[in-house]
Amino acid sequence: MSKKLQLLLGSVLAVALAIYVYPTQKGQHYRIFFNLMEQRPATLSAKPKQNYSFFYLVQQWPKTYCFNNTDCPDNIPNYFTIHGLWPQPENASEGLLINCCKTDWHSDCKFKPIQDNCFLCELEKAWPSLNKSRNNESFWRYQWNKHGTCSLPNVSQDLYFRRAVSLYNQYNLSKIILRPPGIPNDNNSYAIADITKGIKDATGVKALIKCGSKNIPDDYLHEVTLCVNGNATNFQDCKGHNKCKRNISHVIIRR
């Protein structure tokens, strides 16, 4: 056997050793990988990284949300309702934490319909959808997929909703903010300083106020945010400033 032929056969043998051949599911075709190690896709057991520090428990005033909103139902709650429980990074410069399972999917990411009828009644009262086009379960699924999944694996879906409602029930913002002598004039206008002080006195923590929004006048109270620790069990002071224009000292709460 010539030297050239020996070299050729040696090269073929080396390539053959590096080839990994396995049948597809049908068992009729073969895929060939020219790698010594098989490259597998990420498994479904890889849970999302826990890169949040605390939560925003955001409550909204329904009649402000429904201002000029034709998609709102006829019976609008006359009390603050939960908008969402949103995981937040330690530093705002890190950006928003949303849709975390799009890159790190795990079976825990999938929204599971809530089966506990007793808890379901609590959830429907505290966290209702304010849109006719989106029922309650669809709203909860949306909030879980967009925000709640960013708290995995520390806070499961069940804990996420139960702790949100438990935190919501600790302090009745409607009574705290609307209690006498809260109305200084006939147009339901409240001093922002009085609102934040009232919440601080009742809860012991600093809250954040949001005024106005798209299609909502700048001097309408829209949302109140309370900050919560990483386990979603205790309130803590919020950092940052109210989201109201500087020239606004009073806000209207539509009744």
Image (cartoon, rainbow, N blue to C red):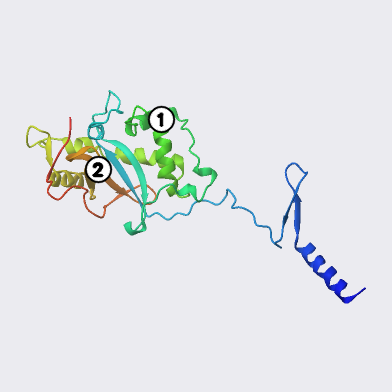
Q: Residue at x 52, y 47 (%)?
A: 105
Toward the right, the furthest residue is 1
Going from N to C along the chain, the mark reached first, 1 or 2, is 1
Q: Is the C terminus in the top left, top right, bottom left or bottom right quadrant?
A: top left
Front one among 63 and 155: 63
Residue pointed to by mark 2: 224
Q: Residue at x 36, y 58 (%)?
A: 94
Number of residues whose C-alpha sits closer than 10 Å to that of mark 1, classed few (under 14), some (14–19) or many (20 or more): some
- In the image, which is nearer the foreground, mark 1 or mark 2? 2
**Where 6 sits versus 122, above or below?**
below
Amino acid at dot 1: Leu
In the visual, does 77 lie left or right of 181?
right
Q: Which quarter of the picture shows residue 143?
A: top left
Q: Report the Cα–Cα distance between label 1 and label 2.
A: 24 Å
- Residue 120: mark: 1
- Residue 137: mark: none
